[in-house]
Image (cartoon, coloured by chain):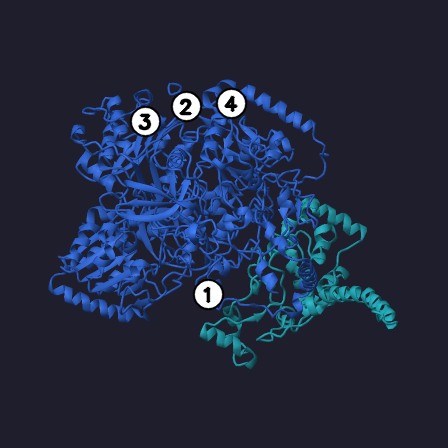
Chain colours: A cyan, B blue
Amino acid sequence: MAQIFRPSANSVAKLSLICFAIGVPSVWLAIAGLSRSPANTKQDVPLNQPVPFSHQHHTWELGIDCRYCHTTVEKSSYAGLPSTETCMSCHSQIWTNSPMLEPIRTSYETGTPIQWNLVNKVPQFVFFNHSIHIARGLNCNICHGPVNEMQITWKGNSFQMAWCLQCHRAPERYLNENITKPGQSPRQQVFNLYWELQKDGVRGLSIKQRDLERGEFTGSDDAEDLAKGRELVKKYGIKTQQLADCGICHH
Amino acid sequence: MSDSETKRPSMELNDKNQEPVEISQQAVRGQLTGKAGKNYWRSLDELADTPQFQEWMEDEFPNRSTLLNINRRDLLKFMGASMALAGLSGCRGVFLPQDKVVPYVKAPEELVPGKPLFYATAVTLSGYATGVLVEQREGRPIFIQGNPDHPASMGALDSISQAEILNFYDPDRANNVIQQVNPGQNLLGDVSTWEIFNQAAQKALVAEAASQGSGLRILTGSITSPTLTRSILAFLKKYPNAKWHSYEPTGRQNVYAGANLAFGKPVDTLYDFSKAKVIVSLDADFLSSTANPGSLRYARDFANGRRVSGLAGSMNRLYSFESTPGLVGSMADHRWAVKPSDIFSLAMALAAALGVAGASPVGKVDQTSIAAIANDLLSTNGACVVVAGDQHSADVHAIVHAINAKLGVVGNTVTYTEPIDATVTHRTGDLKGLVEDLNGGKVQTIFIVGGNPVYDAPADFKFAQALAKAKFKARIGLYDDETANVCDWLVPTTHTLEEWGDARAYDGTISIMQPLIAPLYQGKPLMEIFGLLAGKPANTYDLVKGYWKASGRFKGDFEKEWRSAVHDGLIKGSAAEKITPALNLQLTSLTPTKPSSGIEIIFATDPCIYDGRFANNGWLQELPKPLSKMTWDNVAMISPKTATSLGIEDASVVDLSCNGVVVRTAAFVQPGHPADAVTVYLGYGRTRGGVVCSIPNGEGKSGEGDTRSPGGFFNPVSNFDGGGFNAYLMRTSAAPHFSTVEVKAVGGVTTVATTQGHAPIDGDHVKQFASDDREVIVEYDLDDFNKNASKYVEERKAKSKEIHDANMYPDDIYVYNGPQWAMTIDLNTCIGCNACVTACQSENNIPVVGKVQVARHREMHWIRIDRYYKGDSENPQVAWQPVACVHCEKAPCEPVCPVAATVHSHEGLNQMVYNRCVGTRYCSNNCPYKVRRFNYLNYSDNQRQFDVRVDEKPRIPLLKMLNNPDVTVRGRGIMEKCTYCIQRINEARIESKKAAREIRDGDIVTACQQACPTQTIVFGNKEDKESQVAKMREDPRAYLLMEVLQTRPRTSHLAKLRNPNAEIKSVTPTETNS
């Protein structure tokens, strides 16, 4: 009876063991890497839109308040996307013949809504509420990145759960008071940053304000800030432990 | 491959573990003698307690053995594939298409995206309105709740009215004008247009005009809408010889006939149970929405009369003589199961005992009980009421009018109004007259508005044949149903949520209805259709507003008052005027009902799908009927004693022969059913009218493979998709409610999907729990409780302390912080009406699973109402117990989850995290309350909502619009359970934080609490000592469900109280009908 395995089978066996040992972790790592990469999260990937709307132009250069378009950001879970009519409130007067704005005019005339590409989204089992974050004085740019510098809008952060939990586990690192103007409510301060920017430009901002504006603020570890943050947590009645309960976002 | 094909898990019901347990009735009787009076039981099988039953009962997931047929290699392949896919599912962003976001062109005023808007309107059942608030999200109505300002709702709402939202989105609704060239061929006609229909109708009407409309007929159901009545009358004005007929299959003709006898004119009777200390029901289920249009209000008043808080209290006392076991009998302090033919004698005996002139007892009646009841009634000095069931004869109603007059309760607990139903006064004929005219060739043109007479008319009318004799037959309705099938035209109307309108509530209150959304289909409101036919097209809003402007009801600035009426959903203070009709009745002139020999049959309205008009509603089909817990089917309900004498068992196949018609169905042994009587529910066995209601017999997977049926017979009632049998076939115009029947066992057993044995939690019948001393139901007699409450409290405290001291768990597993959510459920006021179940289903996107899945214990309702029997199986006492997740502080489900998908929150919620769940089901296995539900299949993908679809039309998007956007839609393989409506908690928390205040008591109302007609469920923060829930938790009657398990539930139940009359010792049914 012939041998079942030839001598070369030894090598094949060893090789397959090595491949298995290397292969499985690499596939695992590759998938893990892929799921965290912008290819999956779309972080920092500018997204073309039917109309090349520039946040930089409208908010920074023209100084239009966020809430002019995102009307429900203080009231509802949903920040709100402007209706065609909102666009037309200015563009029926200026740039009335601009070819870039053709889809807006068509939409207004035909009553067909514009289909924008969704930039920021969370999965369907996550229930995010804008209004409470605004009420706690969290600046738009902390989550959305330097929106007021964006020509074409991109997603400022990954919006993966680990990212959310940075703040939900330690809100004191993110809460600030009187960062722009003393005596204002946290909600007012959110938008005041953009007014400051209007006054003297970037040079008028403090380092922390500058960080915020650039969307680079990832929480403060400064002892003084933390002490202030803790005070605010107390003042707002935020129950930090509760903030990381699953049911706060998932239901 | 062929091997695995044959071994593939069978989808049939004949899996080994699903064999219905065959129990001998002798065993039941044997068990009864030993156990009666001591233990609670839920089904006769449980009482008999055979080894097979034990096995079935203790198996939480019967039929899972079939899953083990998968071989090892397949299992490994699946595991490998699942792991790879699980990894990739984290990378969805890479390959999923770009999502779009679509804003408005012109943003509507008032609408804040992400926030609900509520509109007051009304839904009607048989014409009678119940005021509702409809929740609208981004333009879609998604949830119907009661209108707190409306007298017929008081903020609560019954299952049927809540399920209207599903009817609204029903993809099977008629969506086009359809013309049939050859009616009755079961072919879908040609899609037509309103213009063509109108031309055809006008042609027919012009021909009618020549004879002043002598060949013109309108057939409607009950109508209470003043504006619609005016539209119909305006249309008929041109045709003086035309006739308006009305027909309701389970209508209130007997009530009006009884009033005619007693008062010489039809009146509506209203009750005020809030003032009644003693209530006697003669087969009247005034708590059930299918039996009485005022049920929600009555239930509230009745429950308020039974609410006891603290160490002592008083309660009303309810006596019930009942045929089909219903809600009133379940709440009764004394109940007698009687055949319907005995009701007359009982009414007469009661009248005689009370000294009503001319009353003399007839037939055999238990005089001692009657005398005791009479004494009790008289002792209240007019704070009492006697109620007769709508279905009973005019004579019974007349006697009850006389009794109430004698008791001096008229004007107090009983008031009369002119009939609310406009057809009572305005119609010119009933269905019988119409059929005679049709057969006499007198009818050329007929408009059938609503209803479904071809399906539900009495069998002896042979309505379909008669109808065929008319030349122009237009069916105006919501569905392409049996009636539409034999008509020339199907003309779609709009759903209540799509139209302006008005309707009157049970007490006459005028409700103004407003549309929530533009019509989904081509339907038009009835008023517009009549306007079109009359050649005066008008818009419904103008018609309704115009009517009320002209009515003179608004005294001040009309525009202002009208707007506030629309806003409120009703015209305040518009209840019908009370009248005091003069009683003119000779009791001696009434002929007693002949006592029947043999078995009586009761045709009863179905508690879920009513007379069949809601048969296409999956929520209602799957709602367990209150007593039998039956879903998707109707059966022949019989008493255990009758079953023994007929030699049949639960789910035996029987033939019912009645009025020359033989119908095959399954028997169902219903404890508390009167002997020698059979109840069948109407409304099933539809052949047309949508996918859910009319899955054809013999199609799908039914029949074949059902080895338990002899000769492979196919049982029409229990085809596995539900559907039941058509009881109308046995119903004649002479005996629409009761008749006699012959019951014959044909051998064999079939499967019925009843949930009554599902999820056993007590120690009485699950042996492994027997040593636990699990306390499930606690009840006291009121007198005993009033005397000894402090003692019971002490005992309970001592026991709790003992349990607590024996606790081996450390107390500080969780850090509690913030408000602590808790719920209380008062068993004393729960009437078992199922309103909470439907509310939860609607709020929490709970899918419908179909009959096959229910039979496999896979129903998905987060809250169930357990029904416990106690005592003699012929007439047991009933205790209701709603059970949802009790949110244990030491939750057994939590430590066993391998992926931490169920964890505790700092507010004491037992959270279920769907996105973490991998579906091991360990949590459910470890849950002593059996409240967790698992998505075995992709139920929520509505296309597959019901196991068998006869056609595969695209239906998904419409039903998806129904979903509550605040609640995740769960997919296959996910565990779910009651969350205490966490979405409402979170909303209230965020709003309170924005307003810089604490959450107040009453800010959070759970869906079940909101719907409950009797305010049985209370929810709130137990740490707030002023909150209602904190007080209820401290009530002497409060106990924790199975406290001995040391799970520390956050939901407490409050003990049930009964208020028996000491003069009546026995409650056996044999007293009256032996």
Q: In which quarter of the image is residue B100?
A: bottom right
Q: Which of marks 1 and 2 is in front?
A: 1
Q: Looking at the image, is mark 1 or mark 2 earlier in the sequence?
A: 1
Q: Which of marks 3 and 1 is in front?
A: 3
Q: Distance between the residues labelled 4 and 1?
A: 60 Å
Quick check: B715 above or below B895? below
Image position of B755 (left or right of A74): left
Name the disc covering residue B311, or none: 4
Q: Mark 4 lies on which chain?
A: B
Q: Looking at the image, is mark 2 or mark 4 earlier in the sequence?
A: 4
Q: Is mark 2 on a helix, strand or loop?
A: loop
* Residue at image mark 1: B952
Image position of A208 (left or right of B35): right
Q: What element carries label 3?
A: helix
Quick check: B675 above or below B541? above
Q: Which chain carries label 3?
A: B
Q: Distance between the residues labelled 2 and 4?
A: 18 Å
Q: Looking at the image, is mark 4 or mark 3 earlier in the sequence?
A: 4
* Residue at image mark 2: B1060
Type of amino acid at the residue the image marks with label 2: Pro
Type of amino acid at the residue the image marks with label 3: Thr
Q: How far across and down, in percent of the image, does residue B360 sit?
A: 21, 24
Q: Mark 1 lies on which chain?
A: B
Name the disc covering residue B1072, or none: 3
Image position of B431 (left or right of B774): left
Looking at the image, do the residues carrying marks 2 and 3 touch, with CB atoms under 8 Å apart? no
Viewer-closest of B1022 and B776: B776
